[in-house]
Image: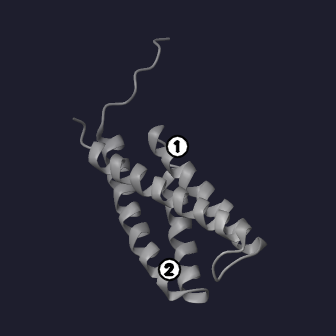
Amino acid sequence: MRRSSGSKIIVHALAFIGVTFWLVMIVRALMGVGQYTGWKLIVTGLVLGGAHLLISLFTRRRSAAAIPLIWFVLVADLLLGVFVNPKVFLLVGASIILLAAGYACRRAWNAAAPLPTAAP
């Protein structure tokens, strides 16, 4: 078992939860159910849901581009918590766990042997 496999599982699980959460929020907004409806929620859901999807994809490809996306999600969750609903701070906690797992994955990738390349 690789050193980063536990962290990678955490990243993928939290990214899946994030995508699922935003899909549910978009469907609820389209149906007019709940307190928050409208195009702003749909756009926010598409952006943050897409960011979660890209985090999982970049993590699978061992790309360092996942870390800035995790920071983007963390800042977006903080802004939602401050300006929209304080209950969103639960998502901030999940984003902090996601960030820690992402950095653990990146450290493991940097410590691992480089990928083989073709000889010249």
Q: Which residue is mark 1?
A: 57
Residue 98 locus on image (x, y percent): 40, 61
Q: Which residue is mark 2?
A: 88
Which residue is at the front of the view, 76 or 40? 40
* Figure coloring: one colour
User: What secondary structure is marked by label 2?
Assistant: helix
Residue 93 locus on image (x, y percent): 39, 74
Three-letter code, disc 2 = Val
Residue 33 seen anywhere in this rendered image of the structure: yes
Which residue is at the front of the view, 4 or 109? 4
Q: With 77 as the anchor, is 113 left or right in this view?
A: left
Specify which label sits upstream in the sequence, 2 or 1.
1
Three-letter code, disc 1 = Leu
Residue 4 seen anywhere in this rendered image of the structure: no
* Most distant residue in the left direction: 1
User: What secondary structure is marked by label 1?
Assistant: helix
Which residue is at the front of the view, 111 or 12? 12
